[in-house]
Amino acid sequence: GPRVRVREKGAGGVVGGPSPRADGEPAANLEMVLEGAIANHTLYRLARHYYLLAEKTKSYQLVMILQMQLPFLREYARAFAEATKTFAEGKPIGDGVGPLTAALLANTDRWREEVEDTVYAEVEFEGRKLLVIKAKGPGGRVGKPGELIRRLARKRKVSRIIMIDAAAKLEGERSGEVIEGVGAAIGGPPVDKYKIEEIATELGIPLDAVIVKESLVESITRMHRKIAEGARNAVEVVRRAILERTKPGDTVIVAGIGNTIGIGQRPDEIPKEFPPPPAPRKGAIESAALPIG
């Protein structure tokens, strides 16, 4: 995926311009702020595009499209504005539920960075050897979990891969709910998903998924107690899965997928206090399935 990384490297260069002293974790957070600003601007351009096109063509259909999408555009606008503020403060976001689960499960300060921006820890659990993976924090990074999983699977005799990630909830579903499934639990560009599924298929390694439900707004704004509680519950689900589906002496990869902003590796870098869930607004869209392109 060199092409997929071009934008990230470009963003890093832009950050280095106005903030030449920013490096490491502050630079990673500034890149996230830049992404939030780009998202806000893109939203403005999208709304302006429909408005001007409708005005020029005198098309009622285009006006109707814009009117029908306004509730969703409004949710996006609120979420992006709040997200940009959260990124600037370096606070954990809902999408960090996977890395938080991994850090809680490992509970160690012995991490290695074998792949750029991606770390792993080797810990013992009930006679099993766990290779716990997450993005390098507490800066705003998602890392390259696919590459690290592939390397570890080739070097070690891995009996199972368990992945933890945030997942989009639908209207009426509860935030922080933990669900078990099968397959590679990872969103975003398909490069990492492909690498994981390829190595798992090649070596015959079963793939388990543990997901924590949340809305689009929750995924990019400050993590609240319900989501953090979901991470703690996910730790117990992972432990139970390891006991039930592996045997002593096995090596298991456990990967916490997502943006690790505000969530480090060492026990003293893991946040323990989270704000209560925001009071629900009347008519607010709670799902992540927004019907706009």
Image: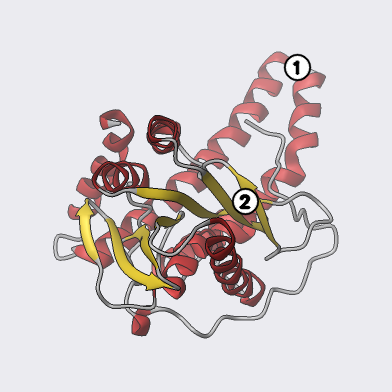
Residue 226, image x and y in percent?
67, 73
Mark 2, Cα crowd under 10 Å, few <14 / some 14-19 / many 20+, is many
Q: 154 or 44, which lies in front?
A: 154
Quarter of the picture containing the C terminus is: top right
For the residues labelled 1 and 2, say whether their Cβ atoms are less than 8 Å apart: no
Asked if residue 96 is positioned above or below residue 37 in the image, the reply reads: below
Horizontally, residue 145 falls left or right of residue 39, namely left
Q: CA distance from mark 1 to mark 2?
A: 40 Å
Residue at 25% in and 61% down: 27
Instruction: Kindly identify the residue that appears in the image at 54 percent across and 54 percent down.
Output: 165
Amino acid type shown at disc 2: Ala
Question: Residue 15: x, y in percent?
Answer: 24, 53
Residue depicted at x 67% and y 33%: 292
Q: Please identify the quadrant where the N terminus is shown.
A: top left
Instruction: Please identify the residue farthest to the front as the structure is shown.
Output: 248
Q: Which residue is mark 2?
A: 167
Residue 247, which numbered label? none
Check disc 1 and report the residue beneath it. 58
State the SS at label 2.
Answer: strand
Please, is residue 96 above or below residue 160 in the view?
below
Q: Is residue 237 visible?
A: yes
Q: How is the image coloured?
A: secondary structure
Residue pictured at 60% horizontal, 81% vertical:
275
Q: Position of residue 137 (x, y in %)?
A: 33, 66
Tell me the SS state at disc 1.
Answer: loop
In the displayed orientation, state which residue is furthest to the left.
21
Mark 1: amino acid: Lys
**Precedes in sequence: disc 1 or disc 2:** 1
